[in-house]
Amino acid sequence: MFRDSTEDKYASAWMQFLLVIALFFSFYATLGWLPLFDLDEGAFSEATREMLESGNYLTTYLNGELRFDKPIFIYWFQLLSVKSFGLNEFAVRFPSAVAATLWVLATYWFIGKNSDTRKAFIGAFVMIASLQITIIAKAAIADALLNLFIALSLFMLYRLYLSRKEKYIYFTFVFVALGTLTKGPVAIMIPLVVSLLFFVIKGEWKFWLKSVFNYKGILLFLAIAGSWYLLEYMDQGEKFVNGFFFKHNLSRFSGAMEGHYGSLFYYIPVFLLGLLPFTSLHIRTLRGVKKLFTNDLYLYLILWFLFVFVFFSFSGTKLPHYIIYGYTPLFVLVGLLWSEKVSAAWLMIPSLLLYILLLVLPLFLHFGGLGKIEDAYAVSILKDSMILFDWRYFVTLSLAIVFSLIMIKINQGAFVKVVFVGFVFIMIINFLILPLVAHAKQTPIKEAAAIAKERNYDVTMYQINVPTFIFYLQKKVSRAVPKAGDIVLTKSNKLDSLKKYDIIYKNRGIALVKVEEK
């Protein structure tokens, strides 16, 4: 499988064992542990629940209304998982974890095809530990699955460039089709444009045209992706065209949807934070950008990253996970260009700074920081959540800082230090930070829904949009203006707009009340 056939089998097996352990703790260990997050996890999960309830496996609905945000593929996987494991957090998240695992394995395979096992391990391990990857791998949304198909499409296109074997054309069309079933035209655009740029630069544009217009490949694409799009159009007609293609695809590029806007430089801080704890490795790789244009594979990978970064920087709608479509080539480059000469301090600084920031954050909030936050809802969440910053929080982060400083000083190779940084970060994020955020922001919504479900309330959402509540309630909610006698879920800072009410549940910015007078 790998070029370096002389590599020690014991070392190879040990690295693969480390990858399995990292995958488990980063992608699987907490799947069913935390409540779902709003908005996206709640929306996808509730749409799947309503699909299960209605038996309509063609069209998705959210709170009884048509939902054209994404195509059908992820919902089918979530539905299959729910039927296997029950209606719970683990079930709706499990397909994403599996997709992310396959994405990592595909990256490991691709690096190994072009290098050796050690470099394949570095690229895959850095990927598993990265902040945005460990988050979306456990998120009940479409992005892990989409990234798997984008990566496979572009891997196959490069194999096509090297070998000229027609089978890679068919593989590409299959993966593009599955990506199109997962999230739409973006799964076509990225492989199409990246490969066009590369083949034109290499003077191979005629071969590119011949491959793109391969009639067998096109028929494969239409058979896989076209069937659902045709059936959905036959079912919903112009509502599908306007809702999916115009509103949720073209409009996202031309303007900011749902307040998701940002400057041209929006993705620079996202890049710096999203690739923690190994941001310094990626900066080190990109610093030698001139070198990346001297090698066909490096050129291909850097074009992939740069196209995604530039395209979505100019998009009207900006969301942090859009840039992840361009992360795979960075993980491959980090693996391919791995060197034991990397400075220990340079390697440790990003995660070390994060741990120090997290350590002082509660102190900042306690000593006046809350007064600097303008969002009243966020303030109410943070004010009631200060109790969550207990001794375990401070001790864990303090130990992470101390051991990171020790690792800078001790005489160990960079490889060992990468493994140390990755595992510590995986544990900190998944067993300390994400649980804290979930308990602060989402647990009150889940608890309010449990009360409403137990008492069989008909609930009205007022000045709040939390699809997770609908999922846990397992019942549609009203969004009308509240009237006397209504059971209302709202933000605690919006209660002043209700003249008289009885509190049923109130915690961390969430209030479930019975309106006596509006």
Image: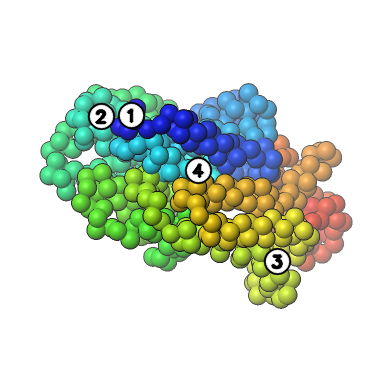
How far, Cα to Cα, is label 3 from label 1?
51 Å
Q: Nearer the viewer, residue 482 or 44?
A: 44
Q: Measuring from the top left, give residue 178's x and y in whole percent.
A: 40, 31
How far, Cα to Cα, is label 1 from label 2?
28 Å
Choose mark 2 or mark 3, whichever is in front.
Answer: 3
Q: Which residue is mark 2?
A: 169
Which of marks 4 and 2 precedes in the sequence? Answer: 4
Mark 2, Cα crowd under 10 Å, few <14 / some 14-19 / many 20+, is: many
Mark 1, Cα crowd under 10 Å, few <14 / some 14-19 / many 20+, is: few
Name the side, left or right, on which 45 lies relative to 252: right
Which of marks 2 and 1 precedes in the sequence? Answer: 1
- Give the residue displayed 43% in from the left and 44% down from the top: 122
Task: Check disc 3 and give the amino acid type.
Answer: Pro
Q: Using the rendered view, name the quadrant where residue 119 is placed.
A: top left
Name the side, left or right, on which 310 lies relative to 207: right
Q: Measuring from the top left, give residue 111's x and y in whole percent.
A: 35, 38
Q: Which residue is mark 1?
A: 5
How far, Cα to Cα, is label 2 from label 4?
29 Å
Disc 3 element: helix
Disc 2 element: helix
Q: Measuring from the top left, give residue 147's x and y in whole percent.
A: 43, 41
Task: Check disc 4 and give the amino acid type.
Answer: Ile
Q: 351 above or below 155?
A: below
Q: Which label is found at residue 128?
A: 4
Q: Nearer the viewer, residue 443 or 165?
A: 165
Choose mark 3 or mark 1, whichever is in front.
Answer: 1
Q: Which residue is mark 3?
A: 362
- Give the residue displayed 59% in from the left and 44% down from the top: 41
Q: Measuring from the top left, give residue 315's x and y in whole percent.
A: 38, 57
Tell me the quadrant of the picture where the N terminus can be found.
Answer: top left
